[in-house]
Amino acid sequence: PPAAPAAPCSVEALNTENELSFVQGCIKQAPDSATLLNVIGLAKSNKQCGVAQRLYANRAQAGNVEVAQAYAREYDPKYLQPSACFTAPDNATAAYWYETILGYQADNAEAAQRLKELKP
């Protein structure tokens, strides 16, 4: 029998599907933040940087503050842990995602503090 298609958001799907198909399939599953951050971690460790960035951006722009915060930290010099996908800090990009967080959660003290330090 033919092999069953890989489950959305799985390592198998990450390794067999094109970037857009994987991201769309994964988003349709509506995984919780912890699951999504694990998938992003898998994408990063497999050097699937486009997948990681698309998943981060999609959920962050949809108002997922936890994912937006993790994405901001990929660019924030205070938190950056260089990887194949996120090699160097980028204050402007980090600031953008902290501003996005504040748009959804105006009382987010950490985002406000980091934004102040990144955009003096």
Image (cartoon, grey):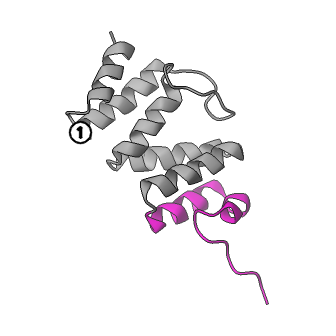
Q: Where residue 2 sits in the image (x, y, percent)?
A: 77, 85
Residue at image point 57% right, 48% down: 40
Question: Is residue 91 found left or right of 6 in the rendered image?
Answer: left
Quadrant in which the C terminus appears: top left
Q: Where residue 12 sits in the image (x, y, percent)?
A: 71, 65
- Considering every residue shown, the one lying at the far bottom of the view is 1
Displayed quadrant of residue 6? bottom right
Nearest the eye: 56 or 38: 38
* Residue hosting label 1: 105
Query: Is-magenta flag for residue 16?
Result: yes
Question: Is residue 109 found left or right of 36 in the rendered image?
Answer: left
Nearest the eye: 12 or 24: 12
- Other residues around mark 1 within 10 Å, as few (<14) / some (14–19) / many (≥20): few
Callout 1: helix, strand or loop?
Answer: loop
Quadrant in which the N terminus appears: bottom right
Q: Where residue 73 sits in the image (x, y, percent)?
A: 47, 30
Displayed quadrant of residue 4? bottom right
- When the figure is inspected, residue 62 is found, relative to residue 9, above or below; the finding is above
- When the figure is inspected, residue 84 is found, relative to residue 30, above or below; the finding is above
Residue at image point 43% right, 26% down: 94
Range of magenta residues: 1-30
Query: Is-magenta flag for residue 91?
Result: no
Residue at image point 64% right, 35% down: 85
Residue at image point 51% right, 27% down: 75
